[in-house]
Amino acid sequence: MVDLPDVSAGTGASVLQCDRAIFTSLPSAIGEGYRLVAWSSGLRPEERVELTRRAPSHGSLCGEGAASRGVIQLCLQSSGRMVWGFVRVAGAEHTRRGGGRIWTEFLVADASEAAREGMHPCDLHAALAAEPASKPPLGSTPLARVTVSRRGGGSAATRDGRAVTVAASVASILLDGRSCVIATGATPSDVLDDALHMIPASLRAGIRACSGLRLSSSRGVTATLTDRFDQDIVRATRGQGIECIDLQAKVPPPGGTIVPWLTLMSRWWNEQRSAQAMALADQLSGGWSVQEILDIAEMSEAIDHGDESAESLQIYLLRRRAA
Amino acid sequence: MGWMQADSGDPQLRCLICEALNTMDVVVCAECSAPMALVHDSVTQGRAPQIISVLGDSNVGKTVYLGFLLDMLSQRANEFEAIPKGAYSVDLQQNVVASMTQRQFPAKTAMEPDRWNWAYYQARKSGGRRSKWYDLVMPDLAGESLAAEIANPATYRVIRSLLTKSAGAMLLVDAALAANGATRPDFFALKMMSYIDSLFQTKRDAKVQTPIAIVLCKADHCPESFDDTRRFVQGSLNRLWNLCESRFQTVEYFACSSVGSLAYATGADDDGLDFARPIPLHTSLQGILEPFEWLISRM
C-alpha cells in the first residue's frame, strides 16, 4: 500500500528563502526617478547594480491599466543567483510626465536552491502578497527576507483548447532556450504562467523569460512574451538572431525531447484536469532528469489507458524521492 | 576611421559608441543599443561625427531642452543650418514639439538604453562655402541611468563609452530648485563632473580639456540667473563652481528657459493623494542656442 497523502505532503514542505528589492520611481531627499528604493540586507552591491540595469522603467509594461502586470525570471550574471520580478502599475508617476508608475518587486534566491525547488512564479508572488506592507519611507530600514513555500495546485489561466496549445507551444520554446520574442495577444503574463505550470518543476529554474513587458536587450532574458509586434520590436530584433514568433498568426507545434510530457499536460488540461497536471509538474522538483520526466509521462499515459495502476506512479515518485 | 569601415570579407560594422562588432543588417547595436544608422550615416559622410552629450538629473528637462535645440537648429535659428541624418533623428524634436503643443511635458525617458532617442545632425553656421560642417550626435539619456552610472560606474557601459568619446557636453542643472535653496542639483552636478573628471584621469595639475557647458534650466523661475549666470552658480551651486574651477579648463555657464508660463492642475489620484500636475501653457525659448553655439566654437 502507498500512503498517497504522504506523497503530496512531501511536495508542500518546500521552502525558499529570498532577498527582496523594490525598484520604482519615488522622490526622496537625495534623488528622484527610477531606482532601487528598498532592499534586503542580503542583497549584494553588484546584484543591486545588475537589478537596476535589468529592471523595467517608465512605459515598459505592455499596458498601463490596473490589471497590467509583468513577470521576469532570470539568473543574475553578477552572482549567479536566481531572480523573479513582479511588475505592476502603482498609481501615477509623481512627475505626472505620461503614464503610470512602474513598480517592480524582486525576489532573489540562491540558484541551487531555486533549481532544487523549481518554484512557480505564482508561489513567489503569493508569498510577496502575504508580506506585511512596508512602512514608509521605503528604504529607511532593510526589507525583510521572504520565505516562499510551494502552494501546490493553483489554477490555470487557460480554459480553452487553443490557449492550451499556446501554453504547450510556449513551454516548448522556453525549454528550447532560444532567443525569441513571442507575441501572445492580450495577456502575455497569463501565457507565461500557464507555460511554466506545464513545465516540470525541476526544469523551471533554467528558464530566462519575461512577460507583459516591452522588448529590451537590457532585460537579460532569452524569451520575451509581449502583447503584439510593433516597429520597435522589428527594429530591435533585425540581424540580432532573435526569432519573432507571432502566436496570433500561427502556433508552432511543441518540439524537442519533452514533447511526450507536453502532450500529456495538454491532454489533461483539455480534459479539465489542469489541477492534476499542475500538481504532477510541481511534484517533479529536485533534479528530475528529462528521461525520468518522459518515463513519468509514459506511465501516466499508460494509467489513463488502463494499462497501469494509478498507484504505480505514486510508488515510482516515492521511490525516486527516497533515492 | 577604422571603426566605420566594413572589414573586407567580414561584413561587420563597429558601433560608433561602444565599438562592438555588429552585422551589417542590424538596426541597433547588440551591445549598447545605439542606432547603427549612426555608423551607416558616418560612412556616407566619410568623417567621424562629434558627440555632444546632454547630461542632467532626472526631471531637469534634458528631453525638452534637446528637443527644442534640435527644432531651433532645423528652423535655421541664428543663421544655423542643420540637416537631420535620418528620420530617427527627428523623432525627439517631433515628440517634444507635439507634446508641448498639447500643453504637456513629454513622457519620461525610459532607463533602458534601447529606448533612448538619438539625433544625428549635420550643422554649420551660415557663412558661405567656407563655414565648417559639424556632424553631431546627441543622445537623449535618462537621468536615472546617469544617476545609476555615476553612483556605480559600469552600470551602463554605454554612458561611459559615450562620455569618453564626447567632444563636448552640456550639463543641465535645475536652477529653480537651486534658487530655492535645494542642495540636490548642486550635489548631482558635483557627482557628474567628478565622474567626468575621473573618466579622463588627468594628472593632478592638468585640467580636463573637454568643453562643458553648464546650463541652468528653468531659469525663468530665477531671473537673476539670466542677469549674472556666473554669480548665480557661484552662490547657489557653489560645490559645482569650485570643482569646475579646480579641474576643468573649458567651462562656461548659461541660463535657459523653455516654458513661458506654467499652470498646475490639482486633484487626487487613485490612492487619494493630492497631486499637482504642471501644465506648460506656452513656450518662450530663451538661451537654448547659446550653450550649443559656445560648445561647437570650442570643439
Image (cartoon, helix red, strand yellow):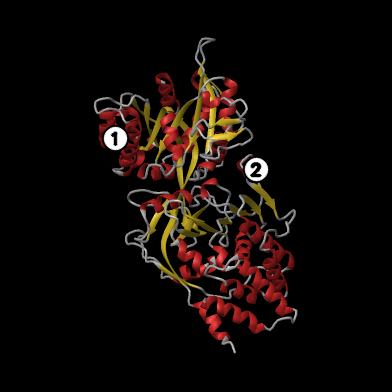
Q: Secondary structure under badge 1? A: helix
Q: Who's the residue at 47% across and 69% down the image?
A: A129
Residue A56 placed where, x, y %?
50, 52
Q: In which quarter of the image is the N terminus of chain A?
A: bottom right
Residue closer to the observer: B254 or A250: A250
Residue B112 in picture, x, y percent from top left? 50, 45
Q: How far from the left and from the top, in percent, is residue B91?
A: 58, 35
- Residue drawn at x 39%, y 55% is A37
Residue B36's disc is none
Residue at disc 2, secondary structure: helix
Chain designation of label 1: B
Residue, disc 2: A234
User: Residue A106 or A273: which is nearer the viewer?
Assistant: A273
Residue A216: x, y in percent? Answer: 55, 47
Q: Which residue lies furthest to the bottom in this view?
A: A1
As drawn, which residue projects farthest toward the front? A323
Residue at 51% in and 47% down: A218
Q: What residue type is labelled 2?
A: Val
Picture quadrant of residue B205: top left
Mark-to-mark CA distance, 1 and 2: 43 Å
Q: Can residue B177 be seen in this view?
A: yes
| Mark 2 chain | A
Q: What residue sits right under mark 1 in the picture?
A: B240
Residue type (three-letter) at the residue carrying disc 1: Leu
